Amino acid sequence: MIEVAVIGIGQVKVDENWDKSLRELAGDAALAALLDSGLQRVDAVYVGNMMSGSANHQQHLGAYIADWIGMRGAEAFRLEAACSSGAASFRTALMAVASGQVQSALTVGVEKMTDSPGDEITAQLATAADADWEAGQGLSFVALNALIMQRYMHEFGWGKEAFAPFAVNAHANACHNPYARFQEPTSIERYMKAAMISEPINLMDASAIGDGAAAAVLVPLELVKSAGRKMVKVAASAAATDTIAIDHRKDPLWLKAAYESGKKAYAQAGVSPSDIDLFELHDAFSIMATLSLEANGFAEKGQGPRLALDGEITPTGKIPVATRGGLKARGHPVGATGMYQIVEVVQQLRGEATGTQVDGACIGMAQNIGGSGSNIITHILQAV
Amino acid sequence: MIEVAVIGIGQVKVDENWDKSLRELAGDAALAALLDSGLQRVDAVYVGNMMSGSANHQQHLGAYIADWIGMRGAEAFRLEAACSSGAASFRTALMAVASGQVQSALTVGVEKMTDSPGDEITAQLATAADADWEAGQGLSFVALNALIMQRYMHEFGWGKEAFAPFAVNAHANACHNPYARFQEPTSIERYMKAAMISEPINLMDASAIGDGAAAAVLVPLELVKSAGRKMVKVAASAAATDTIAIDHRKDPLWLKAAYESGKKAYAQAGVSPSDIDLFELHDAFSIMATLSLEANGFAEKGQGPRLALDGEITPTGKIPVATRGGLKARGHPVGATGMYQIVEVVQQLRGEATGTQVDGACIGMAQNIGGSGSNIITHILQAV
């Protein structure tokens, strides 16, 4: 297998970008990544996106975006794996370069969600759950996560305040990220007083949707070595699924697909959790951040909140998470999120994470979750 | 690069399958392919699908279908490239196995289109065109192809009857294919009298949508050799794009992306057009069949109809096309079509194309088109 490196990254600010179309958002991130890579042209364009067919009446984003950014002729597809579409596009780009089928690949995650009314977007997000057995019963994603969080609090005896540090850390970090949607701090007090959405999930437990795009350029590692540029190697890439409906799981409090893809990724990279310098986890809801820490070996089962309460998830802690704001404060334009995570890990490994730089960061992990833990894709990147 | 083989194929009949859900259709084809492969389990499931988000209110088909067919845990994504989604999933599976990231991959193309009213489906299909510059102006896909066909007839002086052999050949072949939607012959007379849809395209120039699924299992070639099973090697895989909007092309009568991906595929396989024993082309409209023959080197520009009129596209001709009915008579469940093409080429190379077997078929080509020629993916398979 050909070893693969990331040589360019780009992103746009997550926001209600009403003055930018879907292709402009994707194009701005993609062209920034190309500029950063120093390449003029790539062989392939892989687009991660969940809902443009319904939210923007535009499918076929591969050809659509390749055309827009001046890459006519390049191979181009769209990858969809619900909220893990971004990581799916990155993994596809990795496989394309690693197989030798292409010599360079651009991968861009994009989502434009704020043009549609909120209830329509909620219904479109619910298409990531089981249409017959979950969405058809009226379960939205907040409701699904609320059921999980309620059970978690009951099983392990945590009160609501134990989850506050996830939001506090995310917002504190986002203050230093010009691409984050909410560049403002929050506090335990504000967390405790936030409006309830679906008990026990309140506004500060939940990430906000938004419009955004993030991109990266991948090439064979050897090519970067000879070009003498800054290098970030893809040390591991792994994906796993779980049942699509939560009620089909033996234990709804265990992210089996995170454990499986994490285990494979650790083995590929030849590392263990203690080697990971930072972890861009999928904090769509604070309960998902908790479960991710546990499934990936950073905390014992039921003890995720302990790590957060002890301050170990901040940039100076044992396992920094959401270092540029995470889904909670950077924002969660669903199909783009996985690519934001990759971009942020690369920033850390290059020492470019101004304000929240993790000291001596050398190995970073990104984990993108689709559905209620039903599709989980893990990448480990390494500075070389 | 690891060489890759197809060791299992499966399909369901294209039809208005009102008694089968999306997952049942995909599952039936996938399980048939698995049974044919002799494998119990695969590492990855890649799903080709264009419009389940809008037509079936279900996205996240990777995890959804992996779960349904008992492959929980396996990596799984959806590939979308409009009507070339099926070939995109096959190409992704190829890259995954060729890169060594997975040891076995199942790829299934599926589309369930007949649950929605026809006008809704027409609007959903139009999301493959440019939403701003084509679909937004009221151009449907039939209309786009009608403009191309009209220009072609004007430029090269062909009358309507010159296109009849495409429909006649497709229907004649479909009579022998139990998975085809229209297992009935047609004639030049019926072609000439068919109802007009969008001049000059009539009902016999256009493929019908439908519900369907087709699947294949891919593994490293070495693995099949040692298992002593029937082998079909993936000799070439290539993809290319063109402008998404037709009016941005210098020459709307030249399928540049077919030419580019075909050229790459010929080079990879080390063959030329004269080595191709059969060609499963993308005859969504008879004009697309014509242009495909020309762009891939089987006919001079403007001379596609000549080849058809001379009987050279039938199973005993120089370049048999639509040997199991093609999009026209097998049917065109859009995201599944690319996988039906692969399955049909494998049938030919294994000598299992009862009734329309191409004598001594050894090298077969499948070419799947997304949009109006804006995304074209070419595969060459070879019996070994």
Image: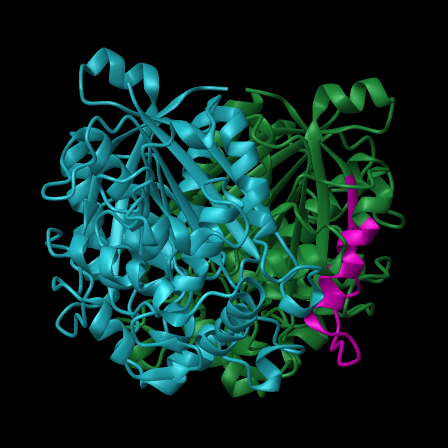
Chain colours: A green, B cyan
Q: Quadrant of residue A373?
A: bottom left
Query: Residue A17 lies in magenta, yes or no?
Result: yes
Query: Residue B105 lies in magenta, yes or no?
Result: no
Residue stretch rendered in magenta on the structure:
A8-32
Locate residue A220, reporting x and y percent.
68, 25
Locate residue A178, reporting x and y percent.
86, 61
Residue in the image at 22% along x and 42% along y:
B315
Q: Nearer the viewer, residue A12 or B151?
A: B151
Q: Is residue B75 visible?
A: yes
User: Does residue B266 lie above or below A77 as drawn?
Assistant: above
- The C terminus of chain A lies in quadrant: top right
Locate residue A186, reporting x and y percent.
76, 70
Q: Quadrant of residue B244?
A: bottom right
Q: Is residue A300 visible?
A: no
Does B197 sit left or right of B25 as displayed? right
Q: Quadrant of residue A101?
A: top right
User: Does residue A354 lie above or below A270 as drawn?
Assistant: below
Q: Nearer the viewer, residue B54 or B338?
A: B338
User: Does residue B286 lie above or below A280 as drawn?
Assistant: below
- The N terminus of chain A lies in quadrant: top right
Residue in the image at 77% along x and 41% along y:
A41
Q: Nearer the viewer, residue A28 or B265?
A: B265
Does A29 sit left or right of B230 as displayed? right
User: Does residue A383 lie above or below B169 as drawn?
Assistant: above
Residue in the image at 55% along x and 77% along y:
A57
Does B124 sit left or right of A346 as displayed? left
Tag count? 0
Locate residue B372, reporting x and y percent.
53, 64
